[in-house]
Image: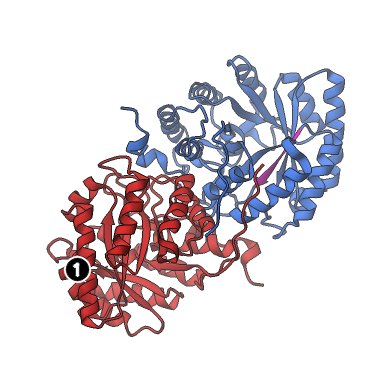
Chain colours: A red, B blue
Amino acid sequence: MHTQPAPPADAVIVREVGLRDGLQSIHRTLATDHKLDWLRAAHAAGLREIEVGSFVPAKLLPQLADTAELVAVARTLPGLVTSVLVPNLKGAQAALDSGADLMLLPLSASHAHSLANLRKTPDDAVAEVGRIRALRDASGSRCLIEVGMSTAFGCTIQGRVDEAEVLRLLQAALDAGADRVGLADTVGYADPQQVARLFEKSFAVAGDRLACGHFHDTRGLGMANVYAAWLAGVRRFDACLGGIGGCPHAPGASGNVATEDLAYLFASMGAPTGLDFDALIALRARLAQWLAGETLHGSLWRAGLPKTMLSA
Amino acid sequence: MHTQPAPPADAVIVREVGLRDGLQSIHRTLATDHKLDWLRAAHAAGLREIEVGSFVPAKLLPQLADTAELVAVARTLPGLVTSVLVPNLKGAQAALDSGADLMLLPLSASHAHSLANLRKTPDDAVAEVGRIRALRDASGSRCLIEVGMSTAFGCTIQGRVDEAEVLRLLQAALDAGADRVGLADTVGYADPQQVARLFEKSFAVAGDRLACGHFHDTRGLGMANVYAAWLAGVRRFDACLGGIGGCPHAPGASGNVATEDLAYLFASMGAPTGLDFDALIALRARLAQWLAGETLHGSLWRAGLPKTMLSA
């Protein structure tokens, strides 16, 4: 028997990343009008951080070619932090031009994944963080720079990823000018004890600049990993409505943790997320129509809230 | 940031309950030959506790009418603890006659669920535990008596279940002669913090006689709840291959936590269960054929083991 900590039930921030991480893994291009409906409905459901796209060359990801248009609309939504993914200096310039509030820079802890995904070594990616910081500062923009540590818990190409390398790269990213860092289980390899251990060590490196947990549910451990990260002190998580964003190496496998299930986890524990379940489930149903043929995931939409959480 | 306990990676026992809890919720009757194939294959995959059926009147659950036949075969499998569900004294006599190693007696913490399910109040069910204990002792049998506390985390009929009532009934069941007790989230209402809290309080009541966690994945929190119970010190869990055993109130919703995913959770954390993943996944595929038309659940079967866990 072990005594467990009881973290305070303070608020949890959910960043909806379906419009980027979710759609990126789906070859079909969702019409901009549907994306804008999604964006507005997600905001209306209470989401206050949304990753709306990625400033990558349109020939690489035609699905996300309308990112600037989405940022423009997102900026008009009250209280919304508009997040975009940025793979390099050119993308950062586009992000700054767009007026996004936050740019997420991927940095792979796996050398092999970094070369395959970004065509850079991790240290070259860190150097790019430094250049992007200089660009941001010179521009006078207040756009936040967040570095997302991909494959922090393992990699489909390289296999094991050394924790010491994750910690070294976290420190390097902060030294290069990242405002915030986060840890991502990009391929669904993490287990809860590993999550607990690596977040604890990462907090020791980054303190409160460690500000995001990004988990996939590829092998059914998504929610357990989120819970472990929450116990370790994480209060901001990425998620995708309907759990989209599956792994290209495992067709049909679950993708990112589902926004609606994540919100339910925290609501059930008394940690407010500010999200409206009915609105999320209704939006998920529209998403299922827009993406007909794609596999959506998650559990809450089918079972509904427990009687104990329904208002009288 | 919170410091987390790191429980020792000692062995975890998985009790396969698909042949009882899983099939009970499926109206179709699986042929006895298929059940015997399932039983033998589960044993061959490393399972050393299997709940093979229930001694209830055949007119109530015709799916489980062949329980005595399954016990007879299960007893021939080396090292297997053969478990059966027993709702009353008559069932207990049948269990003792069959030579089962363990009888699981359900006791609902929810008064409303107890009346609906067992047609007894919880205190009348406790009195029956006492009569079953006397019967067992008089018979000279060494069959273990385990009381499973149903709806310990909430109830679809009554809603909230008072923790003090759970603890009172645990003590009463032990006083009446139960050898062991366990807590069950029968309807998928539990959240991980509730699991942590209630198991901690229950260990204070029952000590090491608290020996089972039974979780459903109805709302996606099954694995997170298992992890929370494991952190609290639980080392024995119920599960169903393919996550069968869905909730009658939510058609298509996930059922019990999936055996293969549970085994993966513990293997990934370095806690051995002795289970063979290839054998479990192969058996799940046969189950999917036998139960064609039923919804199976779980994630690992689709994604496979991570590269970090594959032998060279």
Residue at x 86% of width, y 38% of height = B175
In the picture provided, is B245 more to the left or to the right than A190? right
**Residue at point 34%, 57% (across, down):** A170
Report the front residue among A45 and A77: A77
Residue lying at the far left in this picture: please name it: A59
Magenta residues, as a range? B180-185
Q: Vertical placement of B246 versus B235: above or below?
A: below
- Which residue is located at x 30 percent, y 27 percent? B312
**The quarter of the displayed image where residue A17 is located:** bottom left
- Residue B114: x and y in percent read 76, 48
Q: Position of residue A289 (x, y in %)?
A: 34, 64
Report x, y in % for residue A213: 41, 59
Observer-nearest of A221 and B203 = B203
Q: Which residue is mark 1?
A: A131
Q: Quadrant of residue B310?
A: top left
> Which amino acid is tagged 1?
Arg
Quarter-of-image position of residue A32: bottom left
Magenta region, main secondary structure: strand
